Image (spheres, rainbow, N blue to C red):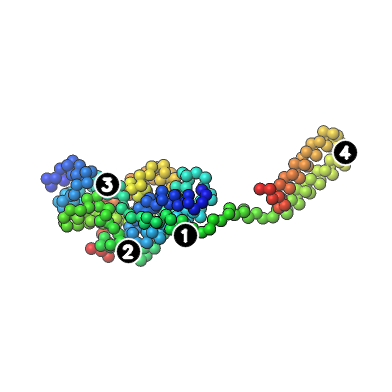
């Protein structure tokens, strides 16, 4: 990798993934641009050691997860839970059924907010595996490589994470003391 | 499957088609295992619509630190290694030229000279004075 122009192309190619993953893993759009910039700066500093594109993307995924994790921890200290009334959370745009009448929107919003809260209650590694698998459509093998875990452990985290999400959504246990 | 008059298959189809669900349909999804599975998968697969600023890549590229040349590996001077190697070479040469048989025949001389040369070469190559890499 030589030259800033080439690195600019790398940013363009991967910025979508970085922004989306940061938004989903932190549960907020606040400071997402700063966080994304931090991701690419860290990647740039580590570029010297890469020869192949495959290794670079793995490294980029790892950095993104680490930056999201740091931000998640920082926010967790600030507030116990994110409200779905939070304008920065941006749930509305992510609804599969966005639009419709007020009641429909509210129902969809509540379910999506419940999902976000339930995601936040999962362990770090379960959340990361779920987002990489479902949202970014990475293979089990790639997730295992990014998380430095055995393949079967990734499968277990995904299965367990999904199961816990479902339980929380169905039992309505993903309530937050500071919201609603 | 829940007994609320709603058909799971129709609801799952509606979810896949992206049709807006009514409030009773949402209530059904929350309580139905199969429909919840479908909804959950679709909700997790829905990529957040994040607007990346058009000039983001250019701005980040512009803010990069000046390109630094690859750092020279910090290597401790190998004075001790060099001294030891030279000592071994010296001992071998002394043995080679002064010792009695069987080392003092032409086969022994050639063998010891080759070994001594190799050790001397290694010492110079790995030593602090070498700058050829």
Q: How far, Cα to Cα, is label 2 from label 1?
A: 34 Å
Q: Quadrant of the C terminus of chain A?
A: bottom left
A86 or B87: nearer the eye? Answer: A86
Foreground mark, 3 or 4? 3
Q: Earlier in the sequence, mark 1 or mark 3?
A: 3
Residue B111 position within the rendered picture, expressed as x and y whole percent measured from the top left: 79, 36
Quick one: SS at disc 1? loop
Q: On residue A7, which mark appears?
A: none
Quick one: SS at disc 2? loop
Q: Earlier in the sequence, mark 1 or mark 4?
A: 1
Q: Considering only vertical position in the picture, is B104 above or below A111?
A: above
Could you tell me if residue B72 is visible in this image?
yes
Please report, as a chain letter, where disc 3 is located: B
Q: On residue A80, which mark appears?
A: 2
From the image, tell me which residue sits under label 1.
B63
Foreground mark, 2 or 1? 1
Give the residue at the far left of this rendering: B5
Q: Residues within 10 Å of mark 4 (few under 14, many from 20)?
A: few
From the image, tell me which residue sits under label 4.
B100
Give the residue at the far top of this rendering: B107
């Amino acid at each position: 990798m030589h030259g800033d122009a080439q690195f600019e192309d790398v940013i363009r190619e991967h910025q979508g993934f970085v922004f989306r993953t940061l938004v989903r893993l932190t549960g907020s759009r606040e400071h997402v641009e700063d966080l994304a910039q931090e991701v690419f700066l860290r990647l740039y500093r580590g570029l010297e050691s890469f020869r192949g594109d495959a290794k670079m993307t793995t490294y980029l995924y790892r950095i993104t997860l680490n930056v999201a994790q740091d931000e998640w921890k920082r926010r967790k200290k600030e507030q116990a839970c994110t409200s779905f009334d939070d304008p920065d959370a941006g749930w509305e745009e992510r609804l599969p059924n966005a639009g419709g009448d007020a009641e429909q929107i509210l129902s969809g919003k509540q379910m999506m907010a419940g999902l976000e809260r339930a995601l936040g209650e999962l362990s770090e590694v379960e959340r990361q595996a779920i987002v990489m698998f479902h949202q970014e459509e990475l293979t089990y093998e790639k997730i295992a490589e990014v998380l430095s875990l055995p393949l079967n452990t990734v499968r277990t985290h995904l299965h367990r994470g999904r199961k816990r999400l479902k339980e929380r959504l169905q039992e309505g246990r993903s309530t937050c003391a500071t919201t609603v | 499957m829940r007994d609320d008059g709603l058909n799971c298959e129709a609801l799952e189809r509606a979810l896949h088609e992206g049709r807006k669900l009514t409030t009773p349909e949402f209530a059904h999804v929350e309580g139905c295992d199969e429909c919840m599975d479908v909804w959950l998968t679709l909700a997790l697969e829905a990529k957040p619509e994040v607007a990346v600023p058009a000039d983001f890549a250019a701005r980040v590229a512009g803010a990069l630190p000046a390109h630094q040349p690859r750092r020279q590996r910090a290597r401790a001077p190998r004075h001790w290694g060099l001294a030891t190697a030279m000592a071994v070479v010296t001992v071998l040469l002394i043995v080679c030229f002064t010792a009695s048989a069987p080392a003092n025949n032409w086969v022994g001389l050639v063998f010891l000279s080759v070994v001594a040369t190799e050790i001397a070469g290694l010492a110079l190559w790995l030593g602090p004075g070498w700058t050829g890499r």
